[in-house]
Image (spheres, coloured by chain):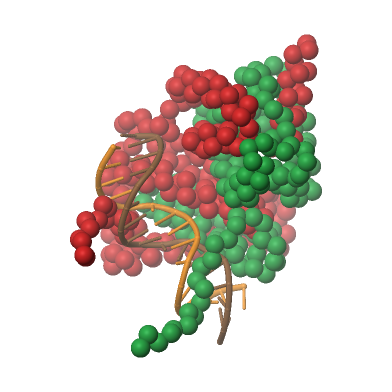
Chain colours: A red, B green, C orange, D brown
Amino acid sequence: MATKVKKQSLGRQKIEIKKIENKSSLEVTFTKRRKGLFNKASELCILTGAEAAVIAFSPGKKAFAFGFPSVDTVIDRYISENTEEGRSVNTSASHHRVVQESRKQYAEALAKKEEEKKRVETMKEGGTVGFGRDRFWWDLSIEDMGLEELERYVASMEELKKNLELGLMSWRRQATLHPDSWIWIPASTQRVLIDIYESICMN
Amino acid sequence: MATKVKKQSLGRQKIEIKKIENKSSLEVTFTKRRKGLFNKASELCILTGAEAAVIAFSPGKKAFAFGFPSVDTVIDRYISENTEEGRSVNTSASHHRVVQESRKQYAEALAKKEEEKKRVETMKEGGTVGFGRDRFWWDLSIEDMGLEELERYVASMEELKKNLELGLMSWRRQATLHPDSWIWIPASTQRVLIDIYESICMN
DNA sequence: CGCACTATATATAATCT
DNA sequence: TAGATTATATATAGTGC
């Protein structure tokens, strides 16, 4: 009894909120946390009906964004609330709140970071970061990943056809295997698309 | 011994990711999650040196934003990357990725939201999907859209149709699929659609 | 409202493949 | 490296002030 079981992993470890120096783990962290951040934003929108946008530039300076209803919608509204056109007392107040929030949040994050570290030096790390030596997956252009993507597309289509014959359920199971490559579209949208397809074919 | 200690709280409960109906708890949730979201964004920036911005409009339509180095800095960069000025092949690719990310994330969230429900209902059909008889989740989610959103959605689809008729292909295979359900669309196809969709939104 | 607290749901650092 | 896996750090739902 009491067999000693060796832990297979240390599990999640506590980390300090400060600039990650190791380049590769920095990339991994960015990818993971970006995903988590976007997911949180999605949930916020769904749960509360809020409209929100998240824009993030990776260490490699590539843009990623999430927005509901769309990035542009949110940005447009944000901008319009903060420019002359609607600059009444109210919107001005709104603007102040926004900016304040922004500063406050970041300040709090910084404070938290320093709290743990009990040190301030991290604040002034050199500005140059030295990215861009290698190309990572998010740096690849669409053209670059075209071939692989295309192959998967064709293979997927074959699978899709096969599975559709068996029913939506089996298809779903198959699709779950590679969730990151797919997107859901609603039936109504699809009908429109098919409608379009037909009109194209008739020409 | 074994004094029975009554739990002081149920603790965090699992919730479905769907619109919260109770207005006050919705507001509380917005506040809590907004805080969490902004904090996550802060950490991402600090840990990876990424530049990011988060903008959120509360259910009460108040604006909140976080940005590093500043909201405007990030928005400006985002906009400049996605407008005529730098619209080369490369920026176009960047644009694609950005929008794709946006759509994908939301779609995934929606998919996740209804995952359980859908599974149950699909199971009930025993492999044969009963189209048209009952109302499934993909129908409900459309109905859950607000009127304004729905109108915008429909309008977008109309525009999409117009644009597709101008000669977008890569789509033909899709059209052979069964029209009465949500389907998965591969990322490559999605890019084409998104390109169109964006051209619509940008007017 | 905003804040505090508890207990549990999630996110994710480390590791391995 | 893009995924899994695992164990632990965090976020947060429910509740009370």
Q: Which quarter of the figure has residue B30? A: bottom right
Q: Which quarter of the figure has residue B31? A: bottom right
On screen, residue B169 versus residue A57, left or right, reads right
Q: Is residue B175 visible?
A: yes
Residue B86 position, x and y percent, is 54, 28
Residue at image x 49%, y 34%?
A178
Residue at image x 22%, y 56%?
A6
On screen, residue A109 versus residue B107, left or right, reads left
Q: Which quarter of the figure has residue A91? A: bottom right
Q: Is residue A153 visible?
A: no
Examine the rendered structure and indicate whether residue A22 appears above or below residue B14.
above
Which residue is at the front of the view, B76 or D7?
D7
Residue B79 position, x and y percent, is 57, 38
Residue at image x 28%, y 47%?
A21
Examine the rendered structure and indicate whether residue B70 appears above or below residue A120.
above
Query: Outermost residue toward the top?
Result: A203
On screen, residue A139 versus residue A118, left or right, reads right
Which residue is at the front of the view, C1 or A87?
C1
Residue at image x 63%, y 34%?
A168
Examine the rendered structure and indicate whether residue A152 appears above or below residue A174.
above
On screen, residue C5 versus residue B27, left or right, reads left
Residue A15 position, x and y percent, is 31, 58
Q: Quadrant of the N terminus of chain B?
A: bottom left
Residue C7 position, x and y percent, is 46, 73
